Image (tube, coloured by chain):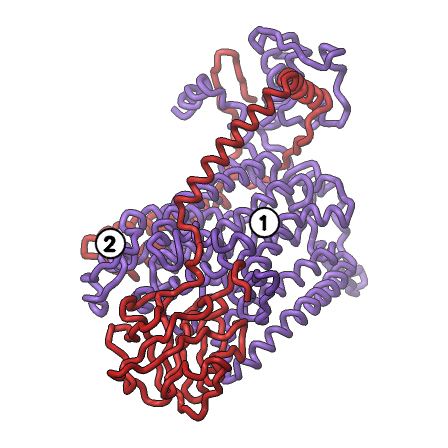
Chain colours: A purple, B red
């Protein structure tokens, strides 16, 4: 049955080659490779729960009188957006769980991306040939943060409304075009009626489409380039060692999606998040104490608090103080992040392809840069709670603020220095990262005991551990025979066997078939009937998976 | 060994089967069964009207059941290898690259023969884009023009509170505070203003503002000059206004000058007078833009 279906599709789409390669794809096994998966699975949960929410949410700031299930607000003037959020929380079956899952999934999504970026950074997985995916990943992080903020703003509650007010001021602070940008984005001066509908179409359509597209590209590039792997027995720059896609990895990854969704579900069910009925409708002249955004905006909020009140005025123009922490800082942050692979290449002059990952301790300088930069943002993150800290520890706000200003410049160098020293130290331990050799207690004929270290495993033994997937072996032996049709279409570029086809040995292949002009003339015949030399060279371009 | 024949007949090869321990098989089976039971329970919950916490827990059990079953199956009941697979060289072979460059070059030279047409094509597409960008941007929102410089406050505007009640000279005790609006713009996001009453003797008036605060009544724009949050918290003891967003502090008695935090400028002050009926009115609108800074604003 399955083979018949597969045949049906192959006759129409010719899927056998690509699908076979995919089914036999090898995935290295390590917990740190699942961080990106958590991000992707949270995104899927976001799509499912988000679609559910769109069925009930009304993106309108039109004022109505609330008469719903939440009695304390009965008779209050609220916006349709706020009222519909209350309704879907209290009157729609599973509505509250879905809304809270959606919010939790967003927080998990961005957290997983951040940790995933750290993993990629500290292990050097961004190095050639994976710079493109690093840049795509940076874009995904930015889009995720922006979309998180937009979604957080939609219910039109007091806390998120204050956030939108700050966002308006931030856009306004951009030199030269700021006021136009803000008026065009918000449909006029703050607050206006366009914010909610505009944020809605950005939040549910435009940015998710961009995320989905870039995520697809991210996965396709990763699929094509194959995974990196940690150094270890039998692993080299030229191979991938791990479990096969079908069925082991498919089952594990599929199961991991459900586990991720399960964790998000229990968070959504049991841990309250964003109870907007307690905050109330957004009213421009009202504000509550301890206003804080979602965690991923914390570093920006912290930067806004720590920035001194410098405003640049001259020539009849002004660069407002919030421009520096709220526009310049994130701009520089994400630019530097996106360009890091190229910056590192400038420093190391390393143009080699890297498929084996670094252990962070083996590259102390990169580890130290990473830890230092991370420490900077962690300090900013905690600075977003200056008021709460001052309150709960009975300190003066002044003390806390200046404390953070000093910490911001003191902690990163110290963290970087410590990281450097620790990495150096750990890296210089003899045999670091290798399995310890066992001590065996032996008894002599006389009855005396002594210990002896077991012999180290021979490198040869380690090389032999990973074998090829049985189908792969058969596939190669299949093509060892001279079946012209199969050989012509697959041999030059297919995954090479243990021997490797000539091209993979790094030897430049043959002279140009037509010679002279450099332009190939493609014979107008079916490919299978092509002359063998020409057919191989040209057919090869399209055939690369 | 697999036999692949020209007519597509397929003989399944022998495959490696993992003889799992019975315990693992039972675990997988149990996980799936528990998941099914939880799904039934969730359906019952919905029929009974639903309850968020129970729904969340049941969803957890359903999803975790499927997840545990699949992962355990994939981890313990199918071959794990490790298998090794050779990486293909990403870079194309020289011949392929040359062929590719040749094709690229061929097309380029074939259209490059007519540079004038190329430029015209570029121009037509570019102009199309630019011309369409203009109405698109224009329909997104009005031009800022003077909107950021003005507020609804006008000469003679009557001060009312958020409920629309008129503010008289007796409304506030010394040390009191209320949010006020012009009577024709109650609840306005831009016109929101804090009205405070300080003891006359404490006030240090800035030059030119001697008449602005009759009987200790002082009115300041409620929009923080930092990021535009409402400066909502009034500390009566220190006579300071606190912005809860980023903790800027403004000293009321010296004309709402910032004394702490990131706010760069004092809150603009609204000049007041008391009319013959004892109502408080604005002498004029604000003499500077309210709220956060922007490029066109000079100082």
Seen from the viewer's position, the closer of residues A241 and B112 is: B112
Nearer mark to the viewer, of 2 and 1: 2
* A63 sits to left or right of B153: left
Q: Look at the image and tell me in which quarter the N terminus of chain B lies.
A: top right
Provide the residue designation for mark 1.
A30
Chain containing mark 2: A
Spatial CA span between label 2 and label 1 = 39 Å
Q: Residues within 10 Å of mark 2 (few under 14, many from 20)?
A: some
Residue reaching furthest to the bottom = B201
Q: Are marks 2 and 1 on the same chain?
A: yes
Seen from the viewer's position, the closer of residues A436 and A241 is: A241
Q: Quadrant of residue A87?
A: bottom left
Q: Which mark is residue A174?
A: none
Q: Position of residue A149 (x, y in %)?
A: 44, 56
Q: Residue at x 76, y 63 (%)?
A: A425
Q: Residue at x 69, y 11 (%)?
A: A533
Q: Position of residue A387 (x, y in %)?
A: 48, 76
Does residue B246 lie above or below A519 as drawn?
Answer: below
Provide the residue designation for mark 2.
A93
Q: Is residue A196 visible?
A: yes
Q: Look at the image and tell me in which quarter the C terminus of chain B lies.
A: bottom right
Q: Quadrant of residue A283?
A: bottom left
Q: Position of residue B254 (x, y in %)?
A: 49, 83
Q: Callout 2: helix, strand or loop?
A: loop
């Amino acid at each position: 049955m399955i083979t018949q279906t597969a045949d049906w599709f192959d006759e129409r789409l010719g899927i056998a080659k690509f699908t076979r390669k995919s089914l036999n794809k090898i995935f290295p096994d390590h917990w740190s490779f699942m961080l990106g998966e958590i991000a992707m699975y949270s995104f899927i949960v976001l799509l499912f729960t988000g679609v559910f929410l769109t069925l009930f949410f009304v993106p309108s700031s039109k004022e109505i009188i609330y008469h719903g299930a939440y009695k304390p607000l009965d008779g209050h003037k609220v916006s349709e957006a706020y009222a519909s959020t209350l309704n879907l929380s209290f009157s729609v079956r599973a509505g509250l769980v879905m809304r809270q899952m959606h919010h939790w999934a967003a927080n998990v999504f961005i957290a997983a991306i951040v940790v995933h970026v750290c993993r990629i950074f500290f292990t050097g997985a961004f190095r050639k040939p994976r710079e493109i995916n690093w840049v795509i990943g940076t874009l995904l992080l930015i889009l995720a943060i922006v979309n998180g903020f937009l979604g957080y703003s939609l219910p039109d509650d007091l806390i998120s409304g204050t956030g939108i007010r700050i966002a308006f001021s931030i856009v306004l602070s951009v030199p030269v075009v700021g006021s136009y940008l803000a008026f065009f984005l918000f449909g006029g001066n703050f607050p206006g009626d366009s914010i909610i509908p505009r944020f809605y179409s950005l939040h549910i359509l435009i940015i998710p489409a961009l995320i989905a597209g870039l995520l697809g590209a991210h996965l396709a590039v990763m699929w094509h380039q194959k995974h990196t792997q940690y150094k270890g027995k039998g692993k080299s720059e030229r191979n991938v060692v791990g479990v096969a896609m079908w069925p082991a990895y498919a089952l594990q990854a599929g199961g991991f999606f459900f586990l991720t969704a399960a964790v998000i579900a229990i968070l959504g069910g049991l841990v309250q998040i964003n109870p907007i009925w307690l905050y109330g409708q957004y009213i421009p002249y009202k504000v509550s104490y301890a206003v804080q955004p979602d965690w991923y905006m914390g570093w920006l909020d912290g930067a806004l608090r720590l920035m001194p009140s410098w405003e640049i005025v001259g020539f009849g123009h002004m660069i407002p103080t919030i421009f520096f922490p709220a526009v310049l800082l994130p701009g520089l942050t994400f630019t530097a992040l996106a360009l890091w692979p190229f910056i590192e290449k400038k420093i190391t002059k390393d143009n080699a392809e890297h498929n084996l990952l670094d252990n962070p301790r083996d590259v102390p300088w990169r580890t130290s840069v990473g830890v230092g930069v991370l420490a900077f943002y962690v300090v900013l993150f905690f600075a977003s709670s200056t008021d709460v800290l001052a309150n709960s520890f009975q300190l003066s706000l002044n003390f806390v603020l200046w404390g953070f200003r000093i910490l911001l410049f003191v902690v990163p160098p110290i963290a970087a220095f410590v990281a450097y020293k620790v990495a150096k130290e750990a890296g210089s331990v003899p045999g670091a990262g290798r399995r310890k050799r066992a001590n065996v207690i032996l008894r002599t004929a006389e009855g005396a005991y002594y210990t002896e270290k077991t012999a180290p495993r021979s490198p040869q033994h380690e090389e032999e551990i990973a074998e090829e997937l049985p189908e792969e072996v058969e596939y190669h032996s299949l093509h060892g025979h001279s079946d012209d049709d199969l050989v012509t279409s697959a041999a030059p570029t297919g995954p090479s066997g243990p021997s490797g086809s000539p091209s993979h040995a790094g030897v430049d292949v043959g002279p140009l078939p037509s010679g002279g002009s450099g332009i190939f003339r493609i014979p107008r015949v079916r490919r299978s009937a092509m002359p063998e030399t020409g057919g191989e060279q040209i057919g090869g371009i399209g055939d690369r998976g | 060994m697999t036999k692949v024949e020209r007519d597509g007949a397929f003989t399944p090869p022998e495959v490696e089967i993992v003889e799992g321990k019975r315990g693992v098989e039972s675990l997988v089976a149990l996980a799936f069964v528990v998941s099914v039971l939880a799904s039934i329970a969730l359906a019952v919950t919905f029929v009974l009207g639903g309850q968020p916490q129970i729904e969340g827990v049941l969803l957890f059990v359903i999803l975790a059941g499927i997840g545990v079953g699949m992962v355990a199956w994939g981890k313990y009941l199918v071959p794990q290898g490790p298998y090794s697979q050779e990486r293909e060289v990403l870079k194309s072979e020289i011949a392929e690259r040359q062929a590719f460059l040749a094709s690229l070059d061929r097309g380029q030279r074939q259209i490059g023969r007519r540079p004038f047409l190329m430029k015209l094509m570029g121009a037509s597409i570019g102009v199309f884009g630019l011309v369409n960008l203009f109405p698109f941007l224009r329909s997104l929102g009005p031009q800022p023009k003077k909107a950021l410089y003005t507020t609804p406050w006008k000469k003679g505007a009557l001060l009312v509170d958020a409920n629309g009640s008129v503010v008289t000279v007796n409304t506030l005790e010394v040390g009191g505070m209320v949010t006020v609006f012009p009577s024709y713009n109650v609840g306005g996001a831009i016109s929101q203003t804090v009205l405070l009453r300080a003891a006359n003797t404490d006030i240090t008036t800035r030059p030119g503002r001697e008449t602005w605060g009759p009987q200790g009544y002082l009115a300041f724009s409620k929009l923080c000059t930092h990021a535009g949050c409402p400066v909502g918290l009034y500390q009566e003891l220190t006579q300071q206004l606190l912005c809860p967003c980023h903790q800027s502090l403004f000293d009321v008695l010296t004309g709402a000058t910032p004394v702490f935090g990131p706010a760069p400028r004092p809150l603009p002050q609204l000049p007041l007078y008391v009319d013959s009926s004892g109502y408080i009115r604005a002498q004029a609108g604000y003499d500077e833009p309210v709220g956060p800074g922007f490029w066109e604003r000079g100082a």
